[in-house]
């Protein structure tokens, strides 16, 4: 197989993979076009072109709250029926406990536990609903859905990891803008979501799941006081205890009934106090009891089963007169419907991205025209959102009904056709009926029939629109996903096939090395089979959520096992028969074996220290590790270790540089450059510790270091192939140097010696630059692991320099695995929480999302990238063993072996992991932990893929550039001679 | 010359190699030793691996190593130079050395380091040593050739070597697999270090003994066929 074919296949497979991956990502994590900004007065009148938006925004921004409030009231034409709102959130309460299921009353003991609430429901003073929540059924996204009426996608959560504050348009923001005073008692998630919005708050943490009593007492202790005060408009109570009870004992826990009793007491207390204050002039108070999600039989939540999504919405105080028992408790709504209902009840604009529909029973007390008005407002808002999703949709170009005043029959159009047409048509129907009703009501000739027709038309539109919108968020386009997965699978199979093809094809070139192998399979020793089996283990472990959470264990375990296997392999050929006891072993062995054994022992020790540096993972983070221990020991210890490891990194890299040859001018120059930048980094670390806030000075210093490192590395890369001394048969004392001339498909010729030298130097330059950069960027406690990673690279190079030329692919795979294990050793995990955000602002004078994103990537993928860059050094090391072992160079074979594998193997292995994990994610899409475990892991897998691409590209580009320059120079030299 | 004499010696050893019933008996006794020690721990001291890992492990390794060293010393490869007592002594000496190797290996593979884990690690590695090092030392002494062939190259070629090699490898591999449940969040008490690893190692050892009996049986049949 020719090199050009191999390169073409690799590139096309990578392109196919990128296409497949992006299709899958866009299919699986839909990025819905959300409307930015907040709704203002413009939401109370409808203009199709929205041209006056900016003007309206401008006027609103300068408007004081009370004026804005009256403006809203004037525009909407509805006087808010309530002045104050009490939002009581009972975390994890299934609606079934209060309302029963399928028309059946709730369980006897639960009904008895909540006598007051049941009484309210049965005499019609409260209306309860089954509010269907959208997955993921965990607290924060559900609270967001309740206050904004929008269903967020996963990427919204993922990309907001540095700020949890809710930036989208929401009810609380709207209330704040009209000057409401808000009080929050309970789960501190609210405080994270809405920092600075509450005039008083007392947050409790949901961290101690075992606590079911104190967590609710901390909420209720302020309640009496707050109910007596009249300086708030919104009181949020968030009770966590019931969720904790569920987590401990499930639905049937013996603590459940007492907890429900406690909640009932709270409802009773609030309701009695609101009845009292109704007579005062504080305005009417509405009590809304909601739960954010339900729970399964075992008390878990997060998924999309009926038990988990069945949350409660209970409105107390809508009707204060005792009416006949309405069967409203069986009604089923969506959780997002709470937001528009509350917005319209309190006379604020509906949040922009709301997909919910108002609950019509809540507006029963309003007159007919007001009821139609709220329906109209909701319709306008949904239509605006639809127009944002379907740009160009305009309902004006539909055939207008000139004679709509003539009769109802002509105005109702049978709606059919595409979804866009259908939505438009339904909307026009409703609007036409409404205007006809209005004109009739002016002439006082309205009938009850007309009215109910209009309401029905509105509801039909709202329901269709809401369902369409929420499906857009949660639906996954099957075709896109399937195509993406297939493309990725084809690409990874291609790469795998190429890998197998190359590793079997290349063997005949060196039959002298395989003297003891009999069959094709026999040459695979335990090490090779194990390292390939690791892939299988990894793929299988990905299907288990706890293995994904604790992935670092797998990498460390597997890697140290392979070290042990390599150690065993190193001992194998040890003097068969010549040394008869252990004692002779100590003395008379060849230097090479000592090298191999000692380098593996070094790898084992450094790997073990790296493993225990960060505990990592999710479940066992509390266990002691070295980083925690150091941080406890104090800042000074950490700093001295940081400086010491910085110094060691510099001296180690200078040592590695001069291992190559001290006397050469080029080496001295490169060494000098990096020595300078190394000391700059040390100086920077000495003067700026992470505990002092970054000053402008520090930013400039860091920028200078970036610049010097960049110039030194790029300079080495560009200039070195031009200045490395060329080897010529005449000038060299070595035998058979002539034969080391290499041809690439007959195009360019150069000597392997100079290629090896420049590859080594450039590779080392990359590694040093990357290590210094990491010393600068990583947390102080991570500087020692960086040193250990460098030690690992150098000692593995030492080992590989003695290991011959068989199984290059296995050694490259080992380097890749080492990179991944190092990734976890630097404290990373598969949750988004461990990303070091603080380091991403080092050296940035202004906030730039792009630059800090790049820095964050550099910090997170320090180790895989470091090991990918070490591939250059590996290539050089392999060239050395090639020179030592082979009399004549089979150039194409060499190129494939030495240049092909370091690029192909990481891409191939990663593509296998990527594809299999994609399939796992697809299979797990309904799993309980899909949003909390599998999706973050998928983001990491995608980022690793990007990292591999970048690293392999750098390696390949450097190699090709070096080859090209060397060939050019040799051609020139020959022509001069 | 030296090679030839060694080969002759090997042949001589082979001639008085263990027969299949003998091998089966040895394995049965070692297996029973494990079972008895677990039974004694359970019935006499009412402890088990989960409740008192170190004490139980100590009980097991004392019984098991005694059985293994006493039995395997009878089959030492150099009965001319080495008396039974000497073989027993070298087996006993190999026990802590092997324990050190096993403990270092376990720590390298990620066994927790800490004062509270120290007794558990020591007892566990002594047990592992009595599975792996002690019988080999009793039989082979300090002959590097044998050690290398059995443990580094895994190329046993006579019944006795099978009987040492396969159970030892089985114990190590079983222990390796036994470590897998440790990071899982099942919150079971047996997920602690060395409990599930010990279970894995004991299972692997038993499976290895079964396999080695099979190999010895097959080997004997082949020998007989050859002789015919």
Image (spheres, coloured by chain):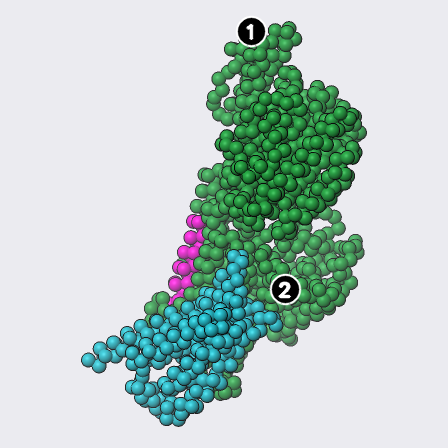
**Magenta highlight range:** A489-514
Which residue is drawn at the image coordinates 69% and 35% (left, top)? A269
* 10 Å crowding of disc 2: few (<14), some (14-19), many (20+): some
Place of residue A79 in the rendered image (x, y in percent of width and height, measured from the top left): 72, 21
Residue at image mark 2: A624
Residue at image mark 1: A406
- Most frequent secondary structure within the magenta stretch: helix
Residue A307, above or below B137: above
Q: Residue furthest bottom?
A: B81
Residue B28, above or below A552: below
The answer to whether residue B26 is left or right of residue A814 is left
Image chain in cyan: B
Which residue is drawn at the image coordinates 59% and 59% (left, top)? A620
- Quadrant of res A655: bottom right
Q: Chain of mark 1?
A: A
Which residue is drawn at the image coordinates 62% and 56% (left, top)? A860
Which residue is drawn at the image coordinates 71% and 28% (left, top)? A275
Quadrant housing the C terminus of chain A: bottom right
Q: Is residue A727 magenta?
A: no
Q: Are marks 2 and 1 on the same chain?
A: yes
Q: Colour of chain A?
A: green
Element at label 2: loop
Q: Residue furthest left?
A: B228
Label 2 or label 1, whichever lies nearer to me, is: 2
Place of residue A621 in the rendered image (x, y in percent of width and height, measured from the top left): 61, 59
């Amino acid at each position: 197989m020719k090199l050009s074919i191999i390169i073409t296949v690799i590139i096309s497979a990578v392109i196919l993979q990128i296409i497949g991956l992006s299709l899958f990502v866009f299919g699986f994590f839909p990025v819905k076009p959300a409307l930015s900004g907040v709704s203002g007065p413009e939401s109370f009148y409808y203009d199709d072109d929205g041209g006056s938006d900016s003007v309206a925004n401008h006027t609103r921004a300068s408007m004081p709250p009370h004026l804005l409030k009256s403006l809203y009231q004037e525009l909407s034409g509805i006087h808010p029926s309530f002045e104050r709102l009490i939002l009581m959130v009972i975390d994890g309460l299934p609606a079934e406990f209060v309302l029963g299921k399928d028309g059946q009353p709730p369980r006897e003991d639960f009904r008895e536990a909540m006598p007051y609430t049941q009484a309210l429901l049965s005499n019609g003073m409260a209306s309860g609903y089954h509010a269907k929540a959208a997955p993921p059924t965990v607290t924060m996204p559900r609270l967001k859905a309740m206050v904004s009426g929008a269903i967020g996608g996963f990427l919204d959560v993922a990309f907001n990891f540095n700020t949890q504050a809710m930036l989208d348009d929401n009810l609380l923001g709207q209330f704040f803008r009209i000057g409401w005073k808000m009080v929050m008692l309970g789960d501190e998630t609210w405080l994270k979501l809405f920092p600075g919005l509450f005039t008083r708050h007392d947050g409790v943490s949901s961290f101690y799941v075992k606590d079911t009593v104190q967590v609710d007492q901390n909420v209720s202790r302020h309640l009496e006081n707050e109910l007596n005060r009249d300086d708030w408009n919104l009181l949020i109570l968030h009770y966590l205890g019931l969720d904790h009870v569920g987590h401990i004992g499930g639905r049937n826990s013996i603590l459940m009934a007492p907890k429900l009793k406690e909640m009932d007491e709270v409802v009773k207390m609030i309701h009695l106090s609101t009845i009292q204050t109704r007579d005062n002039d504080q305005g009417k108070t509405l009590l809304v009891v909601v739960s954010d999600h339900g729970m399964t039989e075992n008390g878990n939540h997060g998924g999309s089963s009926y038990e988990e999504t069945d949350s409660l919405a209970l409105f107390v105080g809508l009707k204060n007169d005792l009416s006949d028992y309405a069967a409203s408790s069986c009604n089923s709504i969506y959780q997002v419907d709470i937001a528009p209902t509350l917005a319209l009840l309190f006379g604020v604009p509906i949040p922009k991205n709301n997909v919910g529909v108002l609950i019509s029973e809540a507006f029963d007390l309003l007159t007919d025209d007001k009821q139609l008005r709220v329906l109209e407002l909701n319709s306008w808002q949904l239509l605006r959102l639809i127009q944002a999703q379907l740009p160009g949709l305009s309902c004006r170009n539909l055939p207008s009904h000139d004679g709509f005043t003539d009769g109802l029959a002509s105005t109702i159009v049978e709606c059919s056709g595409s979804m866009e047409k259908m939505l438009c048509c339904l909307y026009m129907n409703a609007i036409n009926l409404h205007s006809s009703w209005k004109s009739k009501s002016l002439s006082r000739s309205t009938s009850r029939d007309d009215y109910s027709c209009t309401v029905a038309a509105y509801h039909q539109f709202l329901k269709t629109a809401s369902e369409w919108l929420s499906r857009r968020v949660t639906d996954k386009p099957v075709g896109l996903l399937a195509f993406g997965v297939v493309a990725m699978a084809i690409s990874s199979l291609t790469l795998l096939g190429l890998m197998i093809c190359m590793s079997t094809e290349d063997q005949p070139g060196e039959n002298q090395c395989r003297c003891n192998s009999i069959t094709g399979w026999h040459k695979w020793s335990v090490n090779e089979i194990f390292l390939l089996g690791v892939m299988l283990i990894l793929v299988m472990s990905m299907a288990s959520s706890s293995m994904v959470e604790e992935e670092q264990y797998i990498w460390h375990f597997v890697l140290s096992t392979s070290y042990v296997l390599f150690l065993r392999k190193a001992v194998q050929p040890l003097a068969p028969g010549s040394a008869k006891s252990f004692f002779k072993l100590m003395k008379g062995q060849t230097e090479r074996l000592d090298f191999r054994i000692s380098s593996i022992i070094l790898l084992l020790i450094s790997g073990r220290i790296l493993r225990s540096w960060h505990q990592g993972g999710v479940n066992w983070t509390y266990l002691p590790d070295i980083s925690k221990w150091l941080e406890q020991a104090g800042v000074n210890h950490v700093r001295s270790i940081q400086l010491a490891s910085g110094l060691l990194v510099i001296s180690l890299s200078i040592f590695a540089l001069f291992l190559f040859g001290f006397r050469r001018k080029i080496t001295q120059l490169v060494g000098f450059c990096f020595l300078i930048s190394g000391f700059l980094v040390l100086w920077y670390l000495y003067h700026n510790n992470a505990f002092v806030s970054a000053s402008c000075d520090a930013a400039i210093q860091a920028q200078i270091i970036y610049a010097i490192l960049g110039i030194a590395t790029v300079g080495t890369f560009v200039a070195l192939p031009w200045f490395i001394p060329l080897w010529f048969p005449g000038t060299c004392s070595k035998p058979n140097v002539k034969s080391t001339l290499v041809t690439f498909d007959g195009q360019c010729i150069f000597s392997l010696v100079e290629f090896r030298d420049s590859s080594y130097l450039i590779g080392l330059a990359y590694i040093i630059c990357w290590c210094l950069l990491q010393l600068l960027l990583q947390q102080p406690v991570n500087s020692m692991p960086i040193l250990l990673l460098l030690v690992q690279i150098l000692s593995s190079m030492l080992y590989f320099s003695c290991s011959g030329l068989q199984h290059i692919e296995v050694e490259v795979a080992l380097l890749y695995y080492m990179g991944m294990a190092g990734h976890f050793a630097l404290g990373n995990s598969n949750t988004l929480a461990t990303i070091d955000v603080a380091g991403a602002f080092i050296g940035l004078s202004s906030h730039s999302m792009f630059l800090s994103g790049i820095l964050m990537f550099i910090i997170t993928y320090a180790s895989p990238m470091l090991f990918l860059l070490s591939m250059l050094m590996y290539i050089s090391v392999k060239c050395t063993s090639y020179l030592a072992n082979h009399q004549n160079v089979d150039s194409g074979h060499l190129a494939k072996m030495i240049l092909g594998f370091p690029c192909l193997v990481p891409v191939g292995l990663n593509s296998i992991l990527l594809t299999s994990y994609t399939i796992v994610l697809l299979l797990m899409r309904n799993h309980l932990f899909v949003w909390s475990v599998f999706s973050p892991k998928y983001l990491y897998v995608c980022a690793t893929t990007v990292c591999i691409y970048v690293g392999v590209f750098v390696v390949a580009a450097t190699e090709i550039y070096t080859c090209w320059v060397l060939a050019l120079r040799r051609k020139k030299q020959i022509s001069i001679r | 010359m030296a090679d030839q004499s060694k080969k002759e010696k090997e042949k001589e050893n082979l001639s008085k190699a263990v027969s299949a019933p003998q091998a089966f008996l040895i394995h049965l006794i070692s297996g029973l030793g494990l079972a008895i020690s677990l039974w004694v721990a359970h019935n006499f001291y009412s402890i088990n691996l989960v409740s008192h890992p170190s004490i139980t492990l100590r009980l097991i390794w004392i019984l098991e190593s005694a059985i293994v060293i006493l039995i395997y010393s009878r089959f030492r490869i150099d009965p001319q130079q080495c008396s039974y007592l000497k073989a027993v002594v070298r087996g006993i000496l190999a026990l802590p050395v092997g324990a050190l190797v096993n403990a270092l290996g376990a720590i390298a593979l990620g066994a927790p380091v800490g004062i509270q884990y120290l007794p558990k690690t020591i007892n566990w590695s002594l047990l592992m040593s009595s599975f792996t090092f002690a019988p080999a030392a009793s039989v082979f002494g300090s002959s590097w050739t044998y050690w290398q062939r059995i443990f580094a190259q895994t190329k046993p070629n006579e019944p006795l070597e099978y009987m040492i090699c396969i159970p030892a490898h089985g114990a190590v591999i079983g222990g390796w697999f036994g470590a897998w449940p440790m990071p899982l969040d099942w919150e079971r008490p047996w997920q602690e270090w060395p409990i599930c690893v010990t279970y894995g190692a004991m299972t692997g050892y038993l499976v290895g003994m079964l396999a080695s009996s099979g190999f010895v049986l097959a080997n004997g049949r082949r020998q007989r066929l050859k002789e015919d």
